[in-house]
Amino acid sequence: MSETVHDVVIVGSGVAGQSAAVYAARADLSPLVLTGDEPGGQLTLTTDVENYLGFPDGVGGHELVQRGREQAERFGASFRQASVASADLDDRPFELSLSTGETLSARSLVLATGASARTLGVPGEDELMGYGLSTCATCDGAFHRGHDVIVVGGGDAAMEEALFLTKFADSVTIVHRREELRASEILARRAREHDAIEFRWNAELAAIHGAREEGVTGATIVSHPDGHPTRRRADGESVETERLDVQGVFYGIGHEPNTAFLAETGIAVDDRGYVVTDSETTETTVDGVFAAGDVADDRYQQAITAAGTGAQAALDAERRLDERSVAAEDDRRIVA
């Protein structure tokens, strides 16, 4: 184990982690940022970001992430490509076991590991993610003015995505593998009654067509009257195949917060795995551990809100470290 005890370790290098790094570094806390296996987070999957303050002409996701890292490094933050395999948060300092085999010690911890969008693994998915295939209508919907698009899913997330997309797209087709929606009644009703939205029931996405140079040019769906057509096709049953002429595909099948490494640490998570924080701060259920960005946010999940909570987490960590320092000094005086 390293003999160095870091004042602040930030787990995650998306905009939440980078924002926390900037604020912690400016407070002379020399934060260490663990970038994970995919530095930059989900924003690196977005080709153009048009709703981040300060970039009136938009900015590429990779460029925004790179600028954030350079800004944090300028103030004294350091970055290391590693993820946390497990954490011991019972004693101070905290001990973090990394994917590299190293062990780090930290007086405070900022969790900014984000949430990963669920995907389907269909042909064309990897190539076209960020090039017409998106997991965020709020982020990318404006690029589809006048287009025909599909939304995959049947829950609240899918209905919200579809309704938002009607502001830009000519038509929105919701592809759902069953005949009944899982969405709340009010959202389901709004989607069903919207003139620009239609449904493909008992259908699933089978492939996405196109290329990065031209974007999405179409999508293939399969259907079966009893639902779950992909599974039925795998079992040898016949399904109907249809190609849709669309220019955009949106996944509305939810996210998975990246919190597996927090098992048995005392960090409370909700029933979907999102980190639970104090109602007024970013502090978690473990003193000295704070959470920022999508790992604790199942509602907004925007770059700008993640950056804001990253700043809050760093300020909360700084305040807690100062309080502990004052308390330790008082104890020394009493002993003396």
Image (cartoon, rainbow, N blue to C red):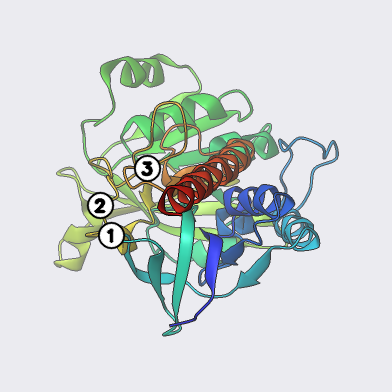
Q: Nearer the viewer, mark 1 or mark 2?
A: 1
Category of crowding for the residue at label 2, using alpha-carbon neighbours closer than 10 angstroms: few (below 14), some (14–19), many (at least 20): few
Out of 33 and 53, give the one closest to the viewer: 33
Mark 3 to mark 1 CA distance (whole Å): 14 Å
Mark 3 to mark 2 CA distance (whole Å): 9 Å
> Mark 3 is on which residue type?
Thr
Mark sitting on residue 266: 2
Looking at the image, can residue 135 be seen?
no
Mark sitting on residue 90: 1
Q: In terms of sequence position, does the residue under pointer 1 or pointer 2 come before the other?
A: 1
Residue 104 percent across, percent down from the top left: 46, 74
Taking the image as shown, residue 15 lies to the left or right of residue 274, namely right
Instruction: Confirm or deny contact between disc 3 and disc 2 (CB under 8 A).
Output: no
The furthest residue to the right: 57
Q: Nearer the viewer, mark 3 or mark 1?
A: 1
Name the residue that disc number 3 marks. 284
> Mark 1 is on which residue type?
Asp
Q: Quadrant of the N terminus?
A: bottom left
Q: Residue at x 35, y 44 (%)?
A: 275
Looking at the image, can residue 163 be seen?
yes
Q: Secondary structure at mark 2?
A: loop
Instruction: Confirm or deny contact between disc 1 and disc 2 (CB under 8 A).
Output: yes
